[in-house]
Amino acid sequence: MWVDCKKICLKSSLLLFLLCATNCGKEHIQRNPYLSTVNFQIEINTNLPQYDGLRFAGGALRLPQGGLKGVIVFNVNGSQYLAWEASCPNHIPKSCSRLELKGVIGQCSCEDYRYSLATGQLINNDTGLSTPYPLLNYRIEHYGNTLRISN
């Protein structure tokens, strides 16, 4: 009887240790409460003239389709691309929250928040935000001259 109790206690302790070891050390990722999830898929051919802005490193273009307020596509280095939600991530979407492109910066006209299109991070965090959210990143795949952007 005593041996069975020891086995049960040992197994329970081991199980508790494993549960804590797998969950206790992980950092909790907080979902942006302002931006809802929308499903979409866009394909663009970068050979077409309307996408000329994406042919060079540092080039950016806002697409009106997809996402909440559109999608911003950014050419990182000539062959790698990033795709971002075109709505400011630090407040509920409204008419002034669609980001305007200013070179390699996305700027929100509501509060003048500015975001790096290379990293998605808020670059003027002197605004007093306690938890500044970065731009919402979308999946982008590159096949020859075609970019497929999706969520």
Image: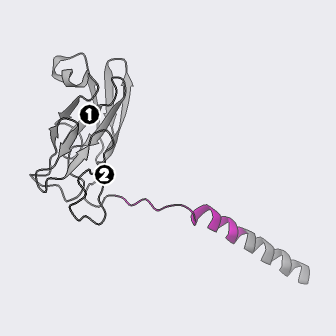
What residue is drawn where x is 37% and y is 25%? 142
What residue is drawn where x is 16% and y is 45%? 99
Q: Position of residue 9 (x, y in %)?
A: 79, 78
Residue 15, quarter of the rendered image: bottom right
Residue assigned mark 1:
73
Asked whether, in this view, residue 93 is left or right of residue 84, the answer is left
Say whether residue 146 is visible.
yes
Q: Based on the picture, tell me whether residue 77 belongs to the magenta stretch.
A: no
Relative to 30, does residue 109 appear above or below in the rendering?
above
Taking depth in this image into account, of 119 and 28 the one nearest to the observer is 119
Taking depth in this image into account, of 77 and 37 the one nearest to the observer is 77
Relative to 17, does residue 63 appear above or below in the rendering?
above
Q: Which residues are magenta?
A: 15-31
Question: Three-letter amino acid code at disc 2?
Answer: Pro
Question: How many tags in the picture?
Answer: 2
Q: Which mark is residue 139?
A: none
Give the CA separation, mark 1 to mark 2: 15 Å
What residue is drawn where x is 20% and y is 17%? 48
Residue assigned mark 2:
134
Taking depth in this image into account, of 94 and 82 the one nearest to the observer is 82
Say whether residue 1 is visible.
no
Question: Three-letter amino acid code at disc 1?
Answer: Val
Q: Residues within 10 Å of mark 1 (few under 14, many from 20)?
A: many
What residue is drawn where x is 23% and y is 58%? 90
Q: Based on the picture, tell me whether residue 26 belongs to the magenta stretch.
A: yes
Quadrant including the C terminus: top left
* Sequence order check, earlier mark of 1 and 2: 1
Relative to 56, does residue 92 appear above or below in the rendering?
below
Q: Residues within 10 Å of mark 2 (few under 14, many from 20)?
A: some
